[in-house]
Image: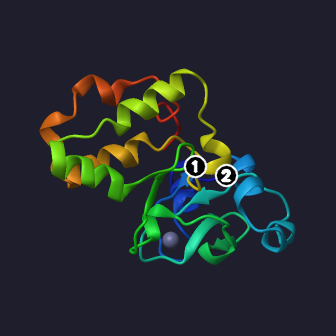
């Protein structure tokens, strides 16, 4: 280990597109990667998720040069899809279109609060349902903002104690 800062940033860069990816738990790969691709991997730890819409890679591990293309992931990856329905919340089945329809009709959407309430009840299974391996609320907020509900998003929502927060970047 010579320069830990540099080697860490290399570990974070997608092997295909170079965009920084966030770590995903082994359970996410085990739940969502198709069996042939999964068995081809040495083990399932230390992978990161590439959210770049233009990149074909879903998961990569720079240290071993391994990558899992999106075609080997069993669910549609919302960040990489352009055709509706674009999944946003995998645990409770909400799409970007549902949130956008709410915003167009009422100026906001109850969906983030519905998701938060279900998370509070411990009903979320993000690690095994969401290809990014973590809570969807950040993505939900992004859809809300894009749909024009920016003014409706309360500050305290971003500090919710959901699994969305406090994960290493
Ligand atoms: Zn990539």
The residue singled out by tag 1 in the image is: 4
Residue 155: quadrant of the picture: top left
Q: Secondary structure at mark 1?
A: helix
Q: Is residue 51 visible?
A: no
The residue singled out by tag 2 in the image is: 1
**CB of residue at label 1: within 8 Å of ligand 1?**
no
Left or right: residue 70 versus residue 102 is: right
- The reply to whether discs 2 and 1 touch (Cβ–Cβ < 8 Å) is yes
**Distance between the Cα atoms at labels 2 and 1?**
6 Å
Residue at coordinates 20% horizontally, 54% vertically from top-left? Answer: 147
Q: Is residue 134 above or below residue 35?
A: above
Q: Residues within 10 Å of mark 1 (few under 14, many from 20)?
A: few
Q: Is residue 49 above or below residue 37?
A: above
Q: Is residue 55 visible?
A: yes
Left or right: residue 121 versus residue 98 is: right
Q: Residues within 10 Å of mark 2 (few under 14, many from 20)?
A: few
- Across and down, in percent, residue 16 comes to 54, 77
Left or right: residue 9 versus residue 114 is: right
Residue at coordinates 31% horizontally, 43% vertically from top-left? Answer: 141
- Across and down, in percent, residue 32 comes to 70, 59
Residue at coordinates 31% horizontally, 35% vertically from top-left? Answer: 110
Extreme residue in the front direction? 105
Viewer-closest of 150 and 14: 150
- Tell me, for residue 155, which label it has, or none: none
Viewer-closest of 140 and 52: 140
């Amino acid at each position: 280990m010579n320069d830990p800062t540099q080697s860490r940033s290399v570990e974070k860069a997608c092997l295909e597109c170079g965009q920084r990816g966030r770590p995903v738990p082994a359970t996410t790969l085990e739940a969502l990667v198709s069996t042939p691709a999964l068995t081809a991997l040495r083990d399932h730890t230390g992978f990161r998720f590439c959210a770049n819409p233009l990149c074909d890679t879903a998961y990569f591990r720079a240290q071993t040069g391994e990558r899992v293309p999106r075609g080997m992931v069993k669910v549609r990856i919302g960040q990489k899809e352009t055709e509706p329905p674009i999944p946003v919340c995998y645990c409770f089945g909400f799409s970007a279109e549902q949130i956008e329809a709410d915003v167009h009709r009422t100026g906001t959407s109850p969906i983030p609060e519905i998701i938060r309430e279900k998370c509070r009840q411990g009903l979320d299974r993000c690690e095994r349902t969401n290809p990014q391996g973590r809570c969807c609320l950040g993505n939900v907020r992004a859809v809300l903002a894009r749909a024009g509900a920016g003014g409706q998003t309360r500050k305290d929502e971003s500090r919710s104690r959901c699994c969305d927060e406090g994960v290493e970047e």
